[in-house]
Image (tube, grey):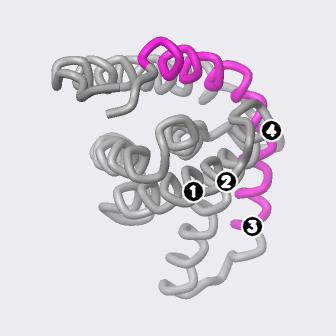
Amino acid sequence: RGMLPKSYVVFKWVVYAIATLFLCALQSLLLNHIRVLGLTPFLYPVLPAAVAMFEGSRRGAVFALLFGIACDLLLPAPFRGFFTLIFPVAAFVAGGVAERLASRGFLCALIVSSLGLLLTGCFRMFVQILSGGQYLALMARITLGEAALTLPALLIVLPVYRMIFRRCAADY
């Protein structure tokens, strides 16, 4: 395959951005209202990991960086820049894992999404350690609980990003 026009590449990433906005709206309008034992699903770390699963670690990390900046502007976090720091790392790791697996189906999505959620939770705990670290056991339970509540949402996230990847599949 030859080089694709830049407009095609821009179109593909605009479609990913629109789909991500749709999934963020799902988080805001639906998932934020689900409470199980005081916990709520937390879809945001799953999204850059899922994109990286399809697009690879480098492209996924760039997407995650931009998504992290948007999340830092809009969401509460332990400190400014939290999502900007952790999402690219999580996407890079997720993309690297996905590149080594034969299939990029539900099992792969489950693995990379779990990594995204766990890395984000571990980073929260690291920040907590730096600031006194009194509630680490509670934070670990929250991280695992959020992951358990969030991973079923892959049944929505995976088809959305898979469709974009398949419809816009081309090497560039």
Q: Residues within 10 Å of mark 2 (few under 14, many from 20)?
A: few
**Does 53 sit above or below residue 169?**
below
Q: How many marks?
A: 4
Of label 1 and label 3, which has the lower sequence position? 1
169 on left or right of 36? left
In this orientation, which residue lies closer to the viewer: 114 or 99? 99
Residue at the image position 64 percent from the left and 17 percent from the top: 159
User: Which one is closest to the eye, mark 4 or mark 1?
Assistant: 1
Highlighted range, magenta: 139-168
Q: Which mark is residue 140?
A: 3
User: Which one is closest to the eye, mark 1 or mark 3?
Assistant: 1
User: Which one is closest to the eye, mark 1 or mark 2?
Assistant: 2
Q: Residues within 10 Å of mark 3 (few under 14, many from 20)?
A: some
The residue beneath circle 4 is 107
Alpha-carbon span between mark 3 and mark 4: 23 Å
User: Which one is closest to the eye, mark 4 or mark 2?
Assistant: 2
Residue 140 position, x and y percent, is 74, 67
**Which amino acid does the dot numbered 3 rest on?**
Ala
Could one spot residue 117 in this view of the protein? no
The residue beneath circle 2 is 100
Residue 44 position, x and y percent, is 52, 40
Could one spot residue 137 in this view of the protein? yes
Q: Is residue 3 magenta?
A: no
Q: Residues within 10 Å of mark 4 (few under 14, many from 20)?
A: few
128 on left or right of 172? right
Q: Quadrant of residue 102?
A: top right
Please, what secondary structure does the residue beneath circle 4 have?
helix
**Does 148 sit above or below residue 31?**
below
**Which amino acid does the dot numbered 1 rest on?**
Gly
Our reading of the magenta stretch's main secondary structure is helix
